[in-house]
Amino acid sequence: MASRSAGHLDHRSAAGSAAAALDAQPAEVERLEALWKTPPNWLAWLTTVDHKALGIRYIVTACVFLVLGGLEAAVMRLQLARPEAHLLSPEAYNQLFTMHGTTMMFLFIQPVLSGFSFYLTPLLIGARELAFPRLNTFSYYVFLFAGVFLYAAFLIGRAPDGGWFNYTPLTSLPFDAGDNIDFYAIGLLFLGVATTVGSINLVVTILRLRAPGMSLDRMPLFLWSSLTTSIAVIASMPALTVALLFLELERRWHFVFFDPRWGGTPLLWQHLFWIFGHPWVYIVFLPATGMLSMIIPVFCRRPMVGHDIVALATVATGLAGFGVWVHHMFVTGIPQIAVGFFSAGSMIVSVPSGAQIAAWLATMWYGRVVLRTPMLFAIGFILQFVIGGISGVMTAVVPFDWQAHDTYFVVAHLHYVLAGGSLFALFGAIYYWFPKMTGRMLDETVGRYSFWVMFAGFNLAFFPMHIAGLLGMARRVYTYLPGLGLDGVNLTSTIGAFVFIGGAALTLANLLRSLHHGAVAGPDPWGANTLEWSIASPPEHYDFARIPIVKSRDPLWDGGVSPGPALDEARLTPQTTPLDARPDGVIELPAENVWPLVMSLTLLGLCTALLVRSGLGIALGAVTSFAAATRWMWPIHLHPLGTEA
Amino acid sequence: MTTTLRAAGDLFSGASGTGHDTGWWAMACVCGTEAAFFAYLITAYAYLATRATAWPPPGIARPSLVIPVVMTVALVTSSLVMAAAERAIRAGNVRALAFRLSISMGLGLVFVGLLIAEYAGRLRELLPQTHVYGSLFYVMTGMHGLHVIAGLLLIGYTLLRTLRGDFRAGAFGGVSVVALYWHFVDVVWLVLFTTLYLSPRFS
Amino acid sequence: MSVFDPASHESAMITAITWKLIVVSAVIYAIVCMVLIRAAARHRDASATAVDLTPRPVIGVVWFGAIIPVVVLVALFLMTLTAMRRYPASDTASPVTYHVTAHQWWWDVAWIDPVPGRTFHTANEIHVAVGRPARIILTSDDVIHTFWVPQLQGKIDLIPGDTTEVRFTALQPGVYRGQCAEYCGAQHAHMALVVVAEPPAAFADWVATEADAAAEPRDSAALTGRRLVVTGPCAVCHTIRGTAAAGAIGPDLTHVGSRLTLAAGALPNNIGTMEAWITSAQSLKPGVAMPSLRLFSGDELRAVAAYLEGLR
Ligand code: HEA
Ligand code: HEA
Ligand code: CUA
Ligand SMILES: [Cu+2]
């Protein structure tokens, strides 16, 4: 058996031998340090281009939104604990569930997963930065400001209240005349800018900046997810943009799109939204599977069984995800042929997920399972996602969906895949990569408690929702009548939700404590296989002192990495060919400047002007945004050697 | 791209496999997402047209072809000139680059002028508020018009940089990026022209 | 409202599918759990550090991850198609026909009589005859709503500009609760309806009564009540056939006293709730188009409620 000792799960031990091999000369290190570090002043801190700092900011900001979305859910659960409760007015409840769904889908789960991509991608591919560092700063601020914009609506009591998919005509002017819906539409248009440019940044980085030798078939599986989802964003986001554009034109200037009196139809909104919306649910799911595919091999002490199958399944899910949107519209009375077609599509899209699950199980089967906290969360993911996936297949069976649609059965489905799936993977990823990000371990005992409490709470909260749905409980109801058999299941759900939140709070406490008091991690506490574990924890500003040359899939396990050049003349990183990663030159990367931040602020101004309908403001916002963009793009030769930003 | 890096050794010297820099790849992605944007607009148009009993709806004339055909000619020519501009700088001819960029830009301006003329005529019989048909017509042409204007700004910016002397035979990534965008805007127009002006004549 | 307690051909068909799906799901889930537990327990080793680099066969992944699931899914899809083709099972011969128009947040129910001119309106309550197919044509007056009576039929949307319909045959007499399932604004939660399935004779009686104009008041209190309703603000919005009240904004009240619930299932129907509804509609169902009307004195209010409750 070709087995050898590589690294240690014991965090007290020193770096593995592969890591040492990538060390550079002291003189090189000194030059790199001078080139890459962010100057120690507040403006540089604010406008940093460091993908590690920005990735962590993305993650932290998104987790703040998680807590907000979680608090909203907690209040909703209190209202639903008993029948005919009067804790919330219907208007308040409707704003809460809309903001809960919108926050979780747009401000928490997608950004948090992108945050991991921004943090990890260069480290996993052996590069020093993303392809467009300033674009990364820009997309962070746009995300932050779009979130602030949406939450500003809460402060003035006019939060969006049309549900996260915001069906017209309920959200058209005659039925919702306040600003609520405009906050939603303009806020999401604004956020779409961040999502789109972030995805473009990732696509170019993954295709062009991989370390020499890291051909596509050697690329870590997380990057397959990241690449697939980024391409899916590029292709699906515009459908939402079109829908929101139509909505605002109709609300603001009385254009016609959704009103049947002048040739429109409300179904147009539904088609456009779900053409975007279904790919979106895979966009917030595939990176989570990518995380699992990183964690499971390490804690099974062997390479992934069926690596190629998993990569293929990831791409297949991303593609097939574009052909199933009508399964959200099975009860709109559209022709049976179409319904049958999309039912079949929804079943086809389940096959790759099944293959992924099977590959993970096979890896566990042939490996030696080490039950540390990240692995516990990975197992929790599998146990819960399979329930969510199967309930998805159940709703793809059209006649069953005629009953289940718009009931708590669907609420159960979506939380099993999103909270039981993506959120659990995220917690696993936090336990797994926190040592890399901070240089400290999270406490294992607290982690285990947190997992078990969350696992119990989650299932207690969300399993009964399947039953509530089948007993006839429609979703999005601010209350329900006693005597319909719904009291018990709802009370159970509420108790479970609070247990779940308690479990998550344990991890939050663990994070806060371990940041300063956790055991020192060292470069490679888990004895892992991929490049990020070959460098210091937390990584130096320049990530890799020597550019790694990659020769295998699990370079740190089979010695498939050797040190390349230091590239210390300027802020340089190698560029390689898209498929087989042959060297293809070197690119110079820009340092921070203030214009990305300025431009995100001027765009925020533009959105605010659109909201308050100030013609002057709109003109001003457009002109200043254009000026900021021009100034930002204006070529400044960074270094005599290099090309420009 | 530099080939004189001390420590890089042989590994990175001279290799130039794909010929396009990261900027070009990013612009390709931008064009991808914009193409999807117009594809969804056209899908919406087709969806509503097939649901309608008459399209354009009764009382609204089919759009006339005269101005749009001239617009098409202007934009296609502009795109061809842009291709010639890129060829010029590949051969290191900065003056030809500047000249051809100006022509290309001029033709783009003609396109925008004609679009305004087209609107002036069309608005007399059809408002965006009249019917979903009008809304779609103005949104689709208007969104494309905005893309043309963005393209003109980009060409203007490239022209300034050309005059500044930023481009040489081996270093003209910026020109390729703009050219790619401009060709894309041209192709989108051809598809829109077919959808909005030609297709109602064949149904 | 349980899906597991069907009372029509249509619902029974879906319940059968539901049970099948539950069993299939449970089996799949049990297999996944068993494999997971075996895999986790096989070589458990909390201190393992060595890495095993031997390649392992992926044939198991292909079988369990692709081939078997495809077989199961094809079977499920065929079941879906056959069920869709057989649904709705009810034939179209001489159905009981209604035209239901959804409003924020109540249902206008129009009886479509084969004899023109005998059409009448009621609200939030539909009666059908046991064993006789019912056909309900659905439109919406404002936003999207969904018609859903779980024990009788699968749900279907009511979309402005479109017309949809449902068909079902109730098999047992009973009172079946339905609920608007599409989020339609502030009072979506309180947009219920009831379907009453009764033996043919009772059903015929109901139709005959409903088609009649409103009953004459039987005592002086009710007489006062009628005067107040007909001359008061109520008539702006409500119709009471046989009186001068001909408003078209709210539900038809001609036989409101005979209904099982008030305000689309929000309240039971009796004198007390009727009085409460008139004075406090806005606190019982915040946001409805009907204002809380406090213009009546105590006696007047009792008279109005008595009159309305007498409309049977
Ligand atoms: C992470 C996000 C995520 C994921 C991954 C999925 C995955 C799937 N979803 Fe889900 N879905 C949502 C998020 C997600 N969904 C959300 C948010 C909504 C609600 C939106 C709203 O209305 O608010 C929704 C709603 C939704 C509906 C509409 C329900 C309705 O409103 O009536 C449908 C219907 O077909 C559906 C189907 C599916 C299917 C078939 C899958 C498949 O991809 C699942 C595949 C996985 C498995 C099947 C499990 C693993 C496989 C095996 C173990 C192999 C063996 C299995 C079999 C043979 C069955 N989903
Ligand atoms: C990622 C997506 C996501 C997540 C994680 C959740 C999480 C939760 N959701 Fe949510 N939910 C949605 C997406 C999500 N939801 C969507 C899309 C809808 C549909 C909306 C619509 O209909 O428009 C919905 C709707 C929805 C409803 C139905 C409302 C209705 O139809 O009327 C309910 C009801 O109970 C509910 C409850 C909950 C609860 C109790 C949680 C709990 O899991 C929350 C747990 C909270 C936390 C975990 C945060 C607290 C955390 C800490 C204190 C520690 C922080 C830790 C770190 C920072 C590491 N959700
Ligand atoms: Cu009507 Cu919900
Ligand atoms: Cu979907």
Image: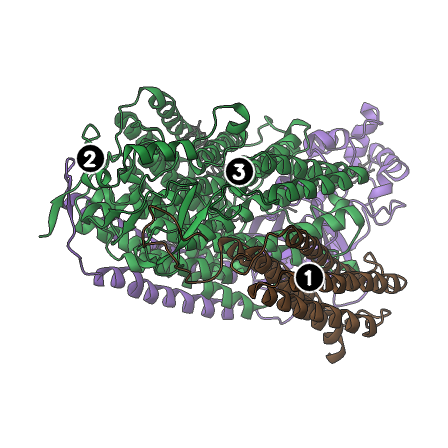
Pick out the residue farthest to the left: A1
Circle 3 packing at 10 Å, graded few (<14), some (14-19), many (20+), is many
Q: Mark 1 points at which residue?
A: B101
| Residue A2, horizontal then vertical, whole percent | 11, 52
**Which chain is rendered brown in the image?**
B
Identify the element where label 2 is drawn.
loop
| Residue C125, horizontal then vertical, whole percent | 67, 49
Q: Mark 2 points at which residue?
A: A9
Q: In which quarter of the image is residue B14?
A: bottom left
Depicted C33 relative to depicted A582: above or below: above
Asked whether, in this view, residue A427 is left or right of residue A12, the answer is right
Q: Quadrant of residue C23?
A: bottom left
Instruction: Between residue C216 and residue A630, name the one nearer to us.
Output: A630
**Which chain is rendered green in the image?**
A
Considering the image in quadrants, where does the C terminus of chain C appear?
Answer: top right
Q: Looking at numbered disc 3 in the image, what kind of residue is underneath it?
A: Thr
Say which residue appears at 45% left-offset and 49% top-offset.
A587
Q: Name the residue under label 3.
A: A137
| Residue A107, horizontal then vertical, whole percent | 53, 38
Residue A329, can we see it? no
Say which residue appears at 58% left-offset and 58% top-offset.
B177
Identify the element where label 1 is drawn.
helix
Instruction: Between residue A466 and residue C49, name the one nearer to us.
Output: C49
Say which residue appears at 26% left-offset and 34% top-offset.
A523
Question: Which numbered disc flags the more N-terminal residue, 3 or 2?
Answer: 2
Disc nearest the viewer among 3 and 1: 1
**Which chain is rendered purple in the image?**
C
> CA separation, marks 3 and 2?
35 Å
Say which residue appears at 75% left-offset and 51% top-offset.
A250
Asked whether, in this view, residue C188 is left or right of residue C150, the answer is right
State whether discs 3 and 1 lie on one chain.
no
